[in-house]
Every structure is written in C-alpha cells, then in structure tokens.
Image (tube, rainbow, N blue to C red):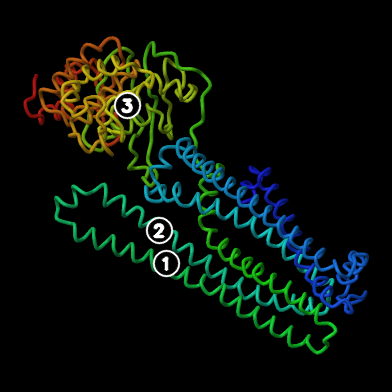
Amino acid sequence: MLRPLARAHRGLVAALLGVGALASLCEGMGISLFLPLLHSMDPAGFEEGTGGALGRVFHRVFEGVPEGARMQVVLGAMFALLAAKAGLNAASGLLFARLDARLVNELRQRVMDQALRVRLGFIERQRTGDMVALVQNQTWETSGALATLIGIVIRLATITVFGLALLSISWRMTLTVAAALLVISWIVRQIGRRVDRLSEDGLREWNTLSQRCIEVLRGQRTARAFGREDHERAAFAASSTSTSQAYWRVERIRALVNPTSELMVAALLAGVLLLSVSDPGKLPAVLTFMFILFRLQPQVQRLDTDRVNLAASAPAVRTVTGFLHEADKPYLPEGTRPFRGLEDSISLHDVSYRYDGQADKDSALRGVTARIPANRTTAIVGPSGSGKSTLTYLLMRFADPLEGTIHLDGIGLAEFELATWRAGIALVSQDAHVFHATVADNIRYGRPDASDAAVREAARKAHAHEFIESLPAGYDTPLGEEGIQLSGGQRQRIALARALIRDARILVLDEATNALDAIAENVIQDALAELAGHYTMIVIAHRLATIEQADHVLVLDRGILVQQGERGRLLAEEGLFSQLHELQPGRTP
C-alpha cells in the first residue's frame, strides 16, 4: 500500500536510505574500534588471531602504529566515525521532516481533489466526520507509516552492519544470539497483529466521535430548542469514552513491547557474558562483542516497536489509499464540446433516476420527457418528494440519468465540458450555503474577478444591499460558519446575489425565495421579471404565486411528469396543477 507513495518521492526516499546506510556503517565501524582500543591498553594482547576475523583486520590496520600512539589513533578514528554518524543522523532528520511535510500536504490535496472529482452522490453518502478524520488525521498517519517503513529499512541496515561485526568476532556466539533474537522478534510480531486488529476498532470509534462532534456543534439550536442538551451531552460522552477505551486497548499492548523486548534481550546479554568469561585472554573480544550487542539491542527493540506502530497505522493507510484508488469510484465522464450558450431548448427524453438504495418503484424520476425553452421562464411544481430538486440535480450534471438523455439544442448534455456547462448555469438552492468569509467574498464566489461595483449591483438585484449596509462592516463583515449571523432569508439573498453576479444565461432557482417575506419576495420577483426574455430561468417552487410570470410549467408527481404547458391552460384543466392552486393561500386566478 505504501509502495506508490514511496515511488512518488523516490528521490527523497533514496536519499534517506543512502544517508541511513552510511550512518549505520559509520556507527558499526566506530563501535568495532572498541576491540583495538582494548588491545591498545594491553600491548601484549595485541596480537594477530585475537578477536576473530575482525581482530585480524584491525591487527593489520594498526600494526604499523607505534604502541605509544596507538590508543590516541584508535580514539581519533572512533571520534571521527561517530562524528560523521552524528552529522548523517542530523541530515537524516531534516530529510525525514521534509518528506513528512511534503507527503502530508500531497495526501491532503489528493484527498480533496478526489472528493471534488468523484461523483457527488458518492461523497454525499460519506459521513462528514469520516471525511474530516480522513483529511486531518489519517493523512498524517499514512505519512508517518511511510516514515516508519523507511526507518525499518534503515534499522535493518544497522542491524546487518552490527551483525557482520559480531560474526567477524565469533560466528558461534552470533548464531546463538541471532536465534534468540528471532524468537524475541516472533513474540513481538504476535503483539503487532493484535495491535492491528484493535487499531481498526479505534479508527472506527474515532470517526464516530468526529461525526458526533460535528452533529452536536451544527445542531446547537435544535438541541437547545427541544431541551436535548443532556441527551447530546451523554451521547457525546459515551462516544468519547468508547474512543478512549479503544485507544487505551491499543496503547496498553503497545506499552508492553519495549519492556518485553528489553527484558528478554537483557537476559540474553547476561547469558552470553556468563558463557564467555571462562577465558580471560578473550576478554577484549568478549567485551567488544558485548558492547556491539548492547548497541544492537536498542536497534532490535526499535525495530519491533516500529513494526507494531506500522501495524497500528495500517487501518489509516488502507483508508487513505482506498479513498484515493480510482478503479472502484464513480466519475462523471468528461465531455469535449465547449458550451457556448443555449439557442433553442433543453430537452429531456424518457429520463429516469433513482438514488442509491432506492427501489425501482421508488425512483425519484420515472420516464420524464419534457422541453424547457431557451430565454423563457419554466416553472417546475409538484408536491414534496415529486422529483423537482432531482431534476435540477441532473440539469446541473451532478449525476447522469440512469435511463434516458438530456439534450442541449439537440446535443447530449454529457458531450459538453463540465467546466463550460457549469460556467453557463447558476444555481440558487433552497439550502443556501454561506462560506465562512466576508459578505463580498461570498457574493464574489460566483465570479472571483468581479469588481466591488459588480458585487454591489448583484446585491441590489437580490434585494440584499440594504441589510448588508446595516452590518457592522458592510460588505467586509465576516459571516461566520454557515452564515450563522444571518437569517434564513438573508442567506438566500446572498446566494441569489452570488448566482446573479455569475452572469450565466441559465438560472436555476430551487425554492430560492421560500424563506423570504412577502415584500422581499415581490422585490426579487420584479428583479427576475426584468431578466425574463434574456435568461433561461428554471424556477422550482411550492408557492405558486412565485411562478405567476412563468411561460411554461412542468408538473411532477411521484417522479412522473403528469402535466406540462402554459400556466393558464393548466389552471383550466382538472389536474394536479389546479388542485395545488386551489390549496394555495391568497391564490390569484
């Protein structure tokens, strides 16, 4: 799972491995000089054959050095090698920090890019808490897992260097120690498998806690209005406790790794020493062997710890790489034809659509065939759940119909570039989203290069200018998360201004005036009336007074188009439209 990430940063990874290998070599050689250092303290013991192959090599290297200066030369060589190792370790630390920063940044951006490219329905099925945890936490863990894996490789190189040094002193003792270390490693590996399983539980609990936190913070007004503070407090406490317990189970087992490994290695060291002190003549070689083994022990211990940590990171790595994997994700096919404007009409031919989990009989749209003329106002009406918003969902091309086609001037909608199509259409939805930014920035979101004058003009058309001017900093007033400082009607007027500044020739209003008072609604209706004939407007409304100026009306019921035509003719018919009209308060003939 980590291999693609390593390949993407092969330069830094190669540098880390190279620097780590050199540091291991310097440390191994520096520690091995402990053997000639001990021999130099007893010139009589400095003879060929003492200390195995390593002793013979050092005998040849230092044989020509005068006895009086031998200790100083050996100490100088040891210091130089260990100083080089310290410098290489510092370089390694900088490289690790650079890799971590670059990789985390890359993963965060790739996750967000994937979230913006994949079909909207896929993202809407994900829990917000899971997505937040994915971006904020699991990308860090994945980056840390790669660093841990590189550290394991470097540690293996260090262990190899130390192992070769031990072999060159005494291959019999080395093989005995290696067998014991393998047993210790196997025991730690079993602990690591247990940690992997428990980490999966911890990750699920953490995602649940993140979701609970988001719901509590977003639902503050509802919770307080219904007196459910104690319930939310208890539910959050239960989720938090469950998360803490899950990670406690992981950390409890992790905490056993170092002491268990250290205790077993200490017993090994004691056993080697007891078996080797029988011959005083071999004491320098035995002490050197013990010193190298003593330095080897932390490397083995850290290797075991790293393997457990890598196992603990495995669930996060699987989540991140699984989300970035493209083969099993749904994407909208990208068209190649640029959209340059609507000349005749938008036409739907036998369009059907159902959301994931819906049965065929409960499809949101079923066999809809209709025409939306250009430069006219088309109203889409019907009871709640009739498929009105689903129709705009498909027109915005958040998804493609499961059956049937949508055409623009006789050309399939899917043939057009998504970017140019969405640049030519503007949406004001019933759930008007306001960003945590200033009023001007929220309006300018529809056209980032718009001037201040254009922002104010769009606000006037949306009947928002007066209330914006009354805010503490006017157009520079921060609106807070989700526009918490604004009323529902004010948020919708900001969203309408955002759509109008886009200057798109197709305007979709999905219940865009449902939160406005009668005066504000009339003003906006007047503004929209001025646009009529110049824009293709698609208006979805429950209040039929909103669509009095519509040229064409589509009537949906349970996903089926039951009526379409001019408003006056539909009122004269005995159909659903006239029934809805009769139920409207303050209706007009």
Q: Which amino acid type is shown beneath numbered disc 2?
A: Trp
Out of 510 and 565, give the one closest to the viewer: 510
**SS of the residue at dot 3?**
helix
Residue displayed at 69% across by 81% down: 268
Q: Quadrant of residue 442?
A: top left
From the viewer's perspective, tell me whether residue 33 is left or right of residue 524: right
- Along the polypeptide, which appears first: circle 2 or circle 1? 2
Identity of the residue furthest to the left in this view: 586
Identity of the residue furthest to the bottom in this view: 278
Q: Which amino acid type is shown beneath numbered disc 1?
A: Ala
Q: Quadrant of residue 487?
A: top left
From the viewer's perspective, tell me whether residue 265 is left or right of residue 281: left
From the viewer's perspective, tell me whether residue 381 is left or right of residue 585: right
Q: Tell me: residue 587, above or below residue 124.
A: above
Q: CA distance from mark 3 to mark 1?
A: 43 Å
Residue occupied by mark 3: 441
Residue occupied by mark 1: 246
Residue occupied by mark 2: 206
Q: Which amino acid type is shown beneath numbered disc 3?
A: Asp
Residue displayed at 71% across by 85% down: 271
Q: CA distance from mark 3 to mark 2?
A: 34 Å
From the viewer's perspective, tell me whether residue 533 is left or right of residue 323: left
Out of 292 and 399, give the one closest to the viewer: 292
Q: Residues within 10 Å of mark 3 (few under 14, many from 20)?
A: many
- Nearer to us of marks 3 and 1 is 3
**Image label count:** 3
Quarter in which the C terminus is drawn = top left
The answer to whether residue 407 shows anywhere in this view is yes
Image coords of residue 128 (percent x, y): 37, 47
The answer to whether residue 576 shows anywhere in this view is no
Residues marked 2 and 1 touching at CB (< 8 Å) = yes
Q: CA distance from mark 2 to mark 1?
A: 9 Å
